[in-house]
Amino acid sequence: MWEFLVSAVINGLMSGAIYVLVALGLTLIYGVLHIINFAHGSLLMLGMYAAFFAWSMLGISPYVTLPFACLGGFVLGYLLYRGVIGRFSAGKDENILLITLGLAIIIENLSLFFFASDTRTISMPGGDDIIIIGWLMISVPKLISFVAALVLCAGLSLYISRSDLGKAIRAVAKERQGARVVGINVERIYAISYGLGIACLGAAACLLMTSFYVSPAVGHAFVLVAFTTVVLGGMGSFVGALVGGLIIGVAESVSGAFLGEQLGQIAIPLIFVLILLFRPTGLFRGSQ
Amino acid sequence: MNTEVTPARRGILVLALIAAVMGYPFVFTSNYAIELGMLVLLGAFLGQAWNVAGGFAGQFSFGHAAFFGTGAYCSAILVSTYGVNPWLAFALAAVSGAVVGGIVGALSFRFGLRGSYFALITLAFAEILRVLADSVPITRGGLGILISADPGWKNLQFESSTGVYYFAAVLCAISLLIAYWLKTSRFGARLAAIRENEAAASALGVNVFWQKVHCLVLSGAMSAVGGAFYVQKYLFIDPYLAYNINRSVEMLLISMIGGAGTIFGPFVGALAIGLIGEGTRALSTAPGLSLVVYGLILILIIGFLPQGLIGLTSKLRRKGASNAS
Amino acid sequence: MNKRDIQSSRVPVTDSRRRRTLLGVAGAAATGTLGFPGLMLAQPAPVRLGLIHSITGPTAYNGQHCRAGALMAIEDVNANGGIKALGGAKLEPVLGDSQSRVEVGVSEVERMQQQGIHAYQGCYNSAVVIAASQAAARYGTPFVVDVGVSDLIVNRGLKNVFRLSPGFGSCVKDGIATLDAIGKSSGRPAKSAVLVHESSEFGASTTKLIQAQLPGIGIEVKDVIAHDTPTRSFDNVVMKIRSLSPDLVMHTGYVNEYLLLARALHRFRADVTAYSILGGGFGAKLVREAPEASAYMLDFNHWYNPKDARVAPLRKRTEDLKMDFIFEVYCAYNAVMLLTDALERAGTVDNEAVVASLASSTWSDHFLPYGPTKFVNGQNQGGAAVGLQVLDGEIKVVAPSAYAEAEAVFPRPKRG
């Protein structure tokens, strides 16, 4: 019985790691731009297609594609902000929400047109490898994603806290007008931050592709979880995204194991509601 | 040229609108066109339901499907499982929406949620309801509920396309009256104050919490009525149809595109979305491409007409006025 | 015709979008019969078949395959001289996209009705089928359901609805009987099972039936696990299954989840035999994308008759279109043939006559493992699914013996 619980917890940590990866970008974007990026799921999907085609047409493993996906994601995010979001929103929050929604519709349906609707998977060598520790079985690709989530989180945190660019980003996040006054190009920082957020998605996409499938609608499966993670962890906090994602993964897994998978799905929106009601700033206040 | 909209002018416009809506089925006689018109009217009604909370009170919700779906299920369960008279079920559906609206409002506002946080929590509520609807026996879970077809007004089922069209027109008219009431009543004025500046409104003596809850109660009831109507029209409901996020997004889009916080905004928005939808489907038959155009238009409208399409008329008026002077 | 054409409705046929007028006033006049007496050597008016499937939306993959099957059948019928009883009238497809949504499906019916459709075929999504066929019933237009799994579709007292493929109830009954037979003939019948299903209509109702009938063949149901569509991970489900150690796992789900569970079972070396009834994800794609995970999986599902000579060429045509030869394709193909037969016997396109002709149909020139058609309350009683297993990287029919290509390997060999 307790073995089952331990398994559920470990599985939860593994799936939680994926949520962390998806949420990292979202929390960065919210922390700096104060917008909820509705296009997050569809951008994740684009990244996954990139990883898929790299594999199916060029034979490149997703792990190798990863740095390119990050770079590509950054460029795409930057351009999207500069060209669409920043330009059309006139700075109003509701507008940005709707613009990102519009982007999501466009991206998803363009993908439907170009890639067709069937799901694609990667069957890479080592994709089904597992580590066996006694009665415990852990999937290797998922373990790699777990480690990657930790590394990425730490890396991003360090970069934002140590680098000059990071300082500028934090300044803008904290006090936009003040940052402008001291000469920071706020719009440029916004675009860079959005780009960074999408770069994180590129990493998440490649890692996810090692054990999941892609189709134009795949983003839907992750969007609400990502939001929940961000809110739980604290908007704008990377450590929060890490802890939040893992908690949610474990909660989902354990409640699924004991309440039944179907009712267990209620854990996520329920956590979401409870956090919003009782501690909307989340566990870690982050760059509020 | 005098571009002011006098009460007389406004009255004429309203009369013209009523005539157009009433006369539409006589000009466009195919069932297909009439049902499209019905969908526009239903869209306008649901958009107005969202508008009550989102536009007039500034409480932006991303989960109005929660109320729509509850109304749909309430009506479906009462009619098909308990044999309740469909008209009574229809009325009770409104009550169910009001109750859920009240609960969501009370919880969210009690804890001070606003803006994006409020939007997200409504999203979560809709999702919770969807999972519940999928899991509990009374909704027959994933199987959905089928209402036996028995056309006739006494069953609140529609024998003809014109019948359902006019029913939707009546609902739409009621929603416009409600919007008018909000625009001109003290309650509406209080909501507007809350929308503009909650702290100031509170300082002025408005009981912010209760006003917001009341407005969600109204909004919820209206959405639920829309849901009950949907069930009586299509005779089938399941958790996805009731509570999926696209339902919420549609209600929001209609109001935002037309002009949130205005009386005719949702109507204009529903019309625009209907025309755009039909237009893009006519232009291109590639899978998904029409929806792409739709998303593009959305972005352009937001970018250039943030007041919504209604804002276009005031922009033109101002232009006309400045040209004249 | 190629795959892009099917997706974009750009086949050389009349597209309801191009034909209709935006206002629909004049459109009503464009019915099927060109009754102008002065036109000599006129082609007999085509029989207009409205095809409504989910070409976009979450089930676009399946809808597109249905459409492809129907279009190939129409091509063949026309190449063979059309409907002879109607003077060689050609079948003319009128394409519709339900976008996997109820309102749009119904709207398509109204749109096509205004153009004078003689019959409908569709729609893949049960909810859309239910609503669209209801709408068609108002006009009495025959509605042939090619794929649509819910049993709520039939038995509604709608005279115009005809479903060719067998419903849940009979598939489950036969599937359980087949499981019993396979178990007995292997000498090692299963004693316990865990049922996994997706939570909506399709999964829930199938599983309820399965759960009720398994004890009847001596199989204990150890657990029933419901999951959402989409589900992100089946690791826990597999852990649970392993802890229960059943002989069988029976999964009813859609394509993606079916694949994920199969891979998870394989990855975690679960020594269970997978036997599904109406598996939903079982098929060539699964075998192609997860060859190791899918080995020895058993499914009781809709299939073609492997002994019919028409199968191989049709499969090749489908694969040339870069599409998968799944049951959506050949079910839709045969549905068109069913309608063709009914038209031949009716000798007219009049709604009532065609409906009556379908109702009295005893058509057997199909390449499905069915007996002759016999419709009761809209459900074809002659339909049946068959037992399938993935053997040596291919799907083979293993039951009933009349159609079997190989013997079932049961239970599956232990995973190394």
Image: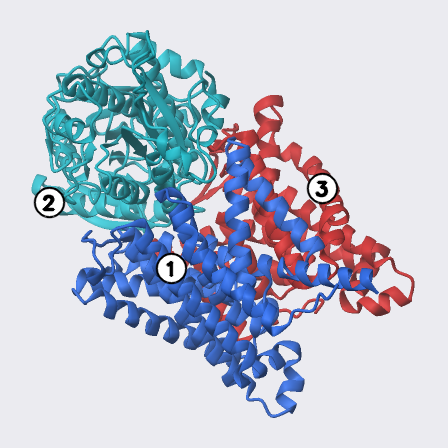
Task: Identify the subunit bearing mark 2.
Answer: C
Percent coordinates x, y for residue C233 in the rendering: 43, 46
Residue at the outermost bottom position: B205
In front: label 2 or label 1 = 1
The shade of chain C is cyan
Q: Gap between marks 3 and 2, in whole Å? A: 57 Å
Percent coordinates x, y for residue C341 in the rendering: 19, 18
Percent coordinates x, y for residue A281 in the rendering: 61, 72
Query: Mark 2 — residue?
Result: C215
Task: Identify the subunit bearing mark 1.
Answer: B
> In the image, A150: left or right of C16?
right
> In the image, C191: left or right of A156?
left
> In the image, A275: left or right of B195?
left
Percent coordinates x, y for residue C387 in the rendering: 20, 26
Task: Identify the subunit bearing mark 3.
Answer: A
Quick one: SS at disc 3? helix
Asked whether the residues under the numbered discs 3 and 1 touch, taking CB atoms below 8 Å apart as contact, a structural biologist would say no
Which quadrant is the C terminus of chain C positioned in? top left
The shade of chain B is blue
- The residue lying at 25 percent from left, 48 percent from top is C204
Residue at the outermost left position: C216
Query: Mark 3 — residue?
Result: A76
Question: Type of residue at label 3?
Answer: Leu
Q: Is residue C309 visible?
A: yes
Residue C98: image quadrant is: top left
Please tell me which residue lies in front, B210 or C399. Answer: B210
Please tell me which residue lies in front, B34 or C399. Answer: B34
Question: Type of residue at label 2?
Answer: Pro
Badge 2 crowding class, 10 Å Cα cut-off, few under 14, some 14 to 19, many 20 or more, is few
Asked if both marks, 2 and 1, belong to the same chain, the answer given is no
